[in-house]
Amino acid sequence: MSSLRFFNTLTGAVDEFEPSAPDGIVGFYACGPTVYDFAHIGNFRSFVFEDLLRRVLEVHGFRVKHVMNLTDVDDKTIAGAARENKPLEEYTARFIEAFNQDLGTLNCLLPHEQPRATRKIPLMLDLIARLIDRGMAYESGGSVYYRVAKFSDYGKLSKKKIEGNLAGASERVDADEYESKEQVSDFVLWKAAKEGEPFWPSPWGNGRPGWHIECSAMSMEGLGPTFDIHAGGEDLIFPHHENEIAQSEGATGLPFVKYWLHCKFLLVDGEKMSKSKGNFYTLRDLLAKGYDPMAIRCALLSTHYRAPLNFTLEGLKDAGEFIRKLDEAFWLCVSRCSNSEGRDDESAKDPLSAELSRIAAEIRAALGQDLNASAALALLLEGVKSINKTLGTDSNAPFSRKDVFQFFDEADAVFGFAVAADKQIPAEVSLLMRERDDVRRQVAADKKNQSLWQKSDELRRGIQAMGWMVKDGKPGEPSVLKRKRRAWDV
Ligand code: AMP
Ligand code: ZN
């Protein structure tokens, strides 16, 4: 298996991936959404990147434990619940469900654990108490703050210097926080309760956790004090991830995470897509406009994760075209398999099998080099072209059914386009198809026979009604069947 290398924000270099437990499980934590609304496709760029990362690790033979938190208490969720006059849990439940549905729609593997902040408060209280014991945190005015000056490694991830402008270390600096903190750079771990807001009891009075402490507590609960990979969007490097390191290493004295991976923003007209700018599409907006979810997934993957992705509907159409080509090549193979037996002889590879196995190895290698998805997608297209060249021009060309399906299965395993999820043509569809191929052979010999033309159209409509599409080849050649991707495909 080719090597696996990732750009590590912590070292600033592309590092060889060596898990902390060589034969064990790779611990992978991804910062999840704040569940106050539907996630937008900028958010999904990060989640699809993380899904690719997990798939590539798995294809390289690693067993991965994937934990993703849900931030279900913060200013925005609290404001949303107040607006709708609902308890916080009831308000966020809807967006948690929608988020997981959206992950499914984009064919992202669901995390193994999805802890919610509001259900893990005792863990956070415990972590804060340990930080106070070690002199790394202090209580002030019913809130608890992290004493940034006590953590000498502060800034090692973001490369920011503590002497510089670090007021941003706190996620949101309220006027009352300024008064209570020893230093501007200190950030809040526990926020004293405010009038009308949800709160939990703590040794320092009623309040709620800060955002950063959630992720330290929940990642270490699921993956232990030291784990392999932590990922998120580039906006999380500072202050969120910097603060997570300070909290976790400050409390345990152990290294927190070995590899930090961050994905650049999805942009609209050069600006970050975000709720506050109003320049966003949710996944649901795009589905309602008729875009294929796999085209959206493809568009999100098409630019390397460390380059900004400028999102346009034009780009989305191109991605749709890519998925269409891939899908057609797959169904060409399925149709050809049902015409002929294919060749399942492993000993003598036909040229197509040899070509596809070379391409599959190059795809693995490209993705292993810091997830070079754009190069990997170009290789996938090369595979599609080879298939079309061999099987599209000659319906009797020899090929190995096993090898072509292996190519599509491997591609699905890493790209997650689910093209080859179903390789079966139902018997009733095959039957109509064979009947139609017979009629078309007769048409080829007797082109003026109107009733034969009508019969062929009738059979096509029957096939379409069962959810399938027919693409005719040259006269007399068998046609190609393809499952409809969307209800309105014709
Ligand atoms: P949030 O729900 O704001 O906590 O964000 C969830 C995830 O989406 C985080 O990993 C963010 O870094 C990421 N994110 C937010 N906006 C964008 C964007 N425009 N492009 C890429 N990732 C984003
Ligand atoms: Zn986080």
Image (tube, rainbow, N blue to C red):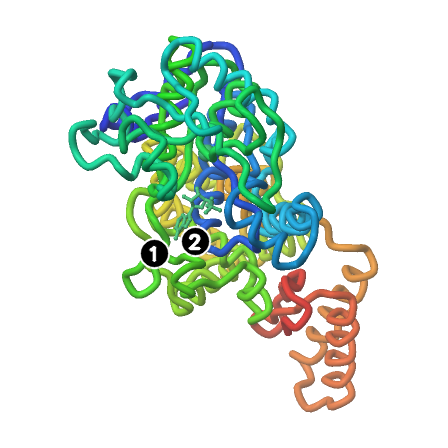
| Picture layout, residue 163 above or below residue 479 | above
- Residue 371 horizontal/vertical position (percent): 37, 37
Q: Is mark 2 within 8 Å of ligand 1?
A: yes
Mark number for residue 429? Answer: none
- Residue 283 horizontal/vertical position (percent): 54, 59
Q: Is residue 334 left or right of residue 62?
A: right
For disc 1, the marked residue is: 272
Tell me which label, 1 or 2, sits earlier in the chain.
2
Query: What distance separates the C-alpha of mark 1 from that of mark 2?
Result: 8 Å
Q: Are marks 1 and 2 in contact (CB under 8 Å)?
A: yes
Residue 237 in sight: no
Identify the residue shown where x is 37% and y is 19%. 258
Identify the residue shown where x is 58% and y is 33%. 117
The amino acid marked with disc number 2 is Gly
Identify the residue shown where x is 52% and y is 31%. 209
Secondary structure category for the residue under label 1:
strand
Q: Quadrant of residue 458?
A: bottom right
Closest to the observer, 146 or 467: 146
- Residue 176 horizontal/vertical position (percent): 38, 40
**Callout 1 crowding tier (Cα within 10 Å): few <14, some 14–19, many ≥20:** some
For disc 2, the marked residue is: 42
